[in-house]
Image: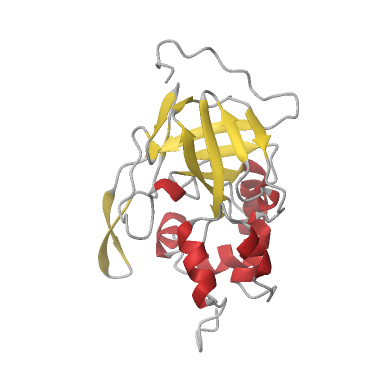
Amino acid sequence: MTSLESRPSAHPTDAAGAGVQSVQVGRAQDHRWLGKDLRTSIFKSPVHGPVAARGVNLEGDEQADTNSHGGPDKAVYAYAREDEDWWAAELGRPVEPGAFGENLTTVGLDLRQAVIGETWRVGTALLQVSDPRTPCWKLGLRMGDPRFPRAFAAGRRPGVLLRILEEGVLQAGDPVHVTGRPDHGVTAETVTRIYYGDDKDLTPLHRATELAAHWRAWVEHRTVWHLQDEGSGA
């Protein structure tokens, strides 16, 4: 793996305009939310300079709940600046990079159309798209609104989780080179639409062998996380 000291300087984006606007990491912290004491690392801070991508996370990052988050299929979370701008318009307030707890804030990529299993060369690291994100209470805490996870689901802009296939070093300003896409064509949007019941045919998910293990298990049980809780009026 390239050392931090020998890491060459990065260019803002590649010729296609796809790149990393910012990199964020965070340690687990205790919070009081909805009357409960909880621990989460969804609050992340920008990294200025190179950061190593090793094992199951970026250096300086961690997951508080390793049963639900983290592991090789969820090592890095990417969210698009374009989607944050969309949310800023929806919310009527600025949305800063890292607001969704993402490690990589990207530009020039439609992450809804990212193909499950496609690979990204970012700096000297090689990452692979494994699944779209599904929201939990932690996103409500981060956004200061317990209803926001439902709004996030309804917005259908999930971002993508990535594996680290080859350890390396990356930083803000690095181009994102998509180095390969599987032929099955199953995208993050495809998975999301099936999960929320917009589409009923599970066949595409069987074709996407690179899909994260927990999704493959879900396909066997086919449970749908509904957008409205009974009687909630949300």
Image point (51%, 89%), residue name: 231
Looking at the rendered image, the quarter that the C terminus falls into is bottom right
Regarding residue 155, the answer to whether it shows in the image is no
**Viewer-closest of 81 and 220:** 220
Q: Quadrant of residue 219?
A: bottom right
How has the structure been colored for display? Answer: secondary structure
Residue furthest to the bottom: 231
User: Compared to 180, does 50 lie above or below?
Assistant: above
Could you tell me residue 208's position as x and y percent? 62, 57
Q: Quadrant of residue 12?
A: top right
Could you tell me residue 158's position as x and y percent? 58, 56
Image point (49%, 33%), residue name: 23
Could you tell me residue 205's position as x and y percent? 62, 63
Count of number-bearing discs: 0
Image point (47%, 14%), residue name: 7
From the viewer's perspective, is 77 left or right of 185?
left
Could you tell me residue 211's position as x and y percent? 55, 55
